[in-house]
Amino acid sequence: MKNGKLFFLKKLLISSGSGGGGGGGEWTELDGARKELEMVRKFGGSGSEVPYLAPLVDSSEIGSSGSGGGSGGGSGGDDGGAAAAAVTTTTTTTTTSGGSGKKRGGRHQIMMVFPWYEMTFGDVIRRCVSKGVDTDAVQVLTLFSQLCKSVLSFHSHKDGCFAIRSISPDTIWLTSPTDLVIFNYGTCRPARLAKV
């Protein structure tokens, strides 16, 4: 909590075995995590042209070698560490094999801070199911319209067409009963368009 507001911390932990030189694709997971951070900074930062996205408050990458050294960087101000220290946390851990040597290599942490929202659309669906009632049609259509506008903005972005993945009821946060923001949009990538 900071200034009476709650924040959400998404933390990616990537461990890599040593094997030298990036051969065998051992840094694939780290590259993927960095690409996710790049996309979140691109679309979730201030001045984004894509509507209905959870805004990025702060971000940081901390890398450490096998000897324990490290380096870090962030997109926010000096208070980024304080914000990240007191928020709700989710962690994804990925470990890659380091070839035949089996020696432990570097470890990286990529952290992204977003505002905290109390409910996802998945929560709404589960609540309706538990009560045996239908979801409100007006609410569903309003949220679906916002979702379509956001996806269309990805497809018609000035830097090219982007495909956004991983949209599900649990990655749609509600800022009010009829307003949403999309979380987990860091999985978007330039779309591969087939020529007809």
Image (cartoon, grey):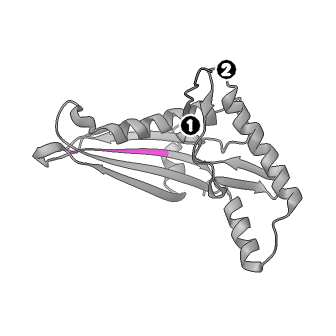
Q: In this image, 29 relative to 55: left or right?
A: left
Q: What amino acid type should be assigned to the residue bearing mark 1?
A: Cys
Q: Residue furthest bottom?
A: 131
Q: In this image, 91 relative to 39: left or right?
A: left
**Going 66% across and 45% down the picture, which residue do you hit?**
54
Q: In this image, 42 relative to 151: left or right?
A: left
User: Which one is nearer the viewer's eye here, 68 or 166?
Assistant: 166
| Residue occupied by mark 1 | 188
Q: Quadrant of residue 100?
A: top left
Query: Which span of residues is magenta-colored?
Result: 105-111
Across and down, in percent, residue 20 comes to 17, 34
**Secondary structure mostly taken by the magenta-highlighted segment of the chain:** strand
In the rendered view of the protein, which quadrant contains the C terminus? top right
Q: What amino acid type should be assigned to the residue bearing mark 2?
A: Lys
Q: Residue furthest right?
A: 138
Q: Quadrant of residue 122?
A: bottom right
